[in-house]
């Protein structure tokens, strides 16, 4: 009886770290999957990921491994769904605002839809009910309104500025 | 901090409530134009429908006031001034679709009202013509309000049924 050894794929990050992962995990990365679909005869050379840091890639690989194992369990879907939720919440919690945005950029480049949805919701949860100033700081946006223009919008939607949470940074 | 592209920002903004979005028009001129863009408004609506978020229950509170109860967090209940409240017009809700309400005031004027943005629009009045000679009869009026994907617009149908002695007339009009 022969056992098949899962094929390994090597990914190389922007800061020149190499990660060897199972093919199934690599195929979770849309960008990598597209590369192999378009180049079926690709050699075993490491795949360069010039927009992804090793810190982000290791988080992403852990996420893909975990969600793959949940999907593999399949039949007890309700507990798997719950575990997935807990994992996702923990993932958001362990990232500060800046590293969350960095992770979104990497996940967007690698085209991992479910993970991107989770992270986008995580950012939305951080800015919901927050002040305009907090959001400007969060995204590094400069205010290009004159004080008069800004006052006009504030007056128009006065009620939307009521009951906003205090900034926590 | 690294900056997110336009599309990536919209994917975050579509998860927010209308209330947050109206406030964030103040963030910058770009954000304001993105939030007001019909493309984004559709993206936001379809995401809200898909994820069952941004749902509110609109309840009459007193004569010219309603309460908007947020389904996702019932603690955030806001009082809502109805359109034309300053004119002391009593309104009646005819129907709702995708967060829009069709309402009618005392004078028979029909309005579309978006309680999330608090904007409203008075619809042009359309008279229904009755066959002559005029018959003394009682009338029942029915309304239906919905979205028409073919014309990509909302439609309000009014059907007036006139009860004659033995005859029945039907007439319907679409906005």
Image: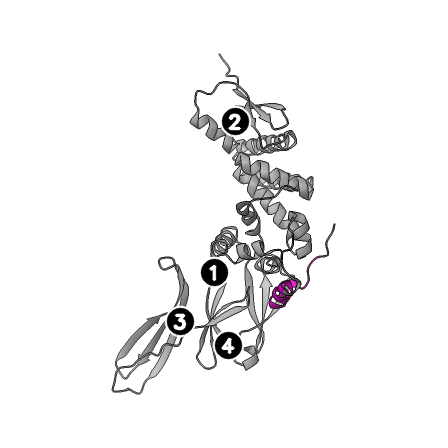
Q: Secondary structure at mark 3?
A: strand
Which residue matches tag 2? A24
Find the distance from the CA under tag 3 to the CA under tag 1: 17 Å
Residue reaching furthest to the top: A1
Chain letter of mark 4 equals B
Whether the magenta-drawn stretch holds residue B88 is answered as no
User: Can you tell which quarter of the image residue B31 is in?
Assistant: bottom right
**Percent x, y of residue B141:** 38, 76
**Other residues around mark 1 within 10 Å, as few (<14) / some (14–19) / many (≥20):** some
Q: Is the residue B65 above or below the residue A47 in the image?
A: below
Q: Residue at x 44, y 27 (%)?
A: A37
Question: Which region is colored magenta?
Answer: A149-166
Residue reaching furthest to the right: A169
Which residue matches tag 3? B143
Which residue matches tag 4? B91
Q: Is the residue B131 above or below the residue A62 in the image?
A: below
Q: Is residue B142 left or right of residue B69?
A: left
Q: Secondary structure at mark 1?
A: loop
Asked whether the beta carbons under mark 1 and mark 4 sit within 8 Å of each other, the answer is no
User: Can you tell which quarter of the image residue A25 is in?
Assistant: top right
Q: Secondary structure at mark 4?
A: strand
């Amino acid at each position: 009886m022969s056992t098949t050894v899962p094929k390994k794929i090597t990914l190389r990050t922007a800061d020149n770290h190499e990660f060897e992962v199972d093919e199934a995990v690599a195929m979770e990365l849309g960008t990598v999957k597209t590369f192999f679909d378009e180049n079926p005869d690709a050699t075993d050379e490491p795949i360069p990921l010039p927009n992804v840091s090793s810190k982000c890639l290791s988080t992403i690989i852990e996420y893909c491994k975990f969600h793959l194992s949940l999907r593999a369990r399949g039949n007890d879907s309700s507990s798997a769904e719950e575990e997935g939720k807990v994992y996702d919440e923990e993932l958001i919690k362990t990232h500060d605002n800046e590293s969350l945005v960095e992770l979104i950029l990497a996940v967007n480049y690698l085209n991992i839809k479910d993970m991107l949805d989770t992270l986008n919701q995580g950012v939305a949860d951080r800015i919901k009910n927050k002040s305009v100033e907090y959001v400007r700081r969060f995204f590094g946006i400069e205010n290009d309104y004159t004080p008069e223009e800004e006052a006009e919008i504030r007056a128009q939607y006065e009620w939307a500025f009521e009951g906003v949470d205090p900034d926590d940074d | 901090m690294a900056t997110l592209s336009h599309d990536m920002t919209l994917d975050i903004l579509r998860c927010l409530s209308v209330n947050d979005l109206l406030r964030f028009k103040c963030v910058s001129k770009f954000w304001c134009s993105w939030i007001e863009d019909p493309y984004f408004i559709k993206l936001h609506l379809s995401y809200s429908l898909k994820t069952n978020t941004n749902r509110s229950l609109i309840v009459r509170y007193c004569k010219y006031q309603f309460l908007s109860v947020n389904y996702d967090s019932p603690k955030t209940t806001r009082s809502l001034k109805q359109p034309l409240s300053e004119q002391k017009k009593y309104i009646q809700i005819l129907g709702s679709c995708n967060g829009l309400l069709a309402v009618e005031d005392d004078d028979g004027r029909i309005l579309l009202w978006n309680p999330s943005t608090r904007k409203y629009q008075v619809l042009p009045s359309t008279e229904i013509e009755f066959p002559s000679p005029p018959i003394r009869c009682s009338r029942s009026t029915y309304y239906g309000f919905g979205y028409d994907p073919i014309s990509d617009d909302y439609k309000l149908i009014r059907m007036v049924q006139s009860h004659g002695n033995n005859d029945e007339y039907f007439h319907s009009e679409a906005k």
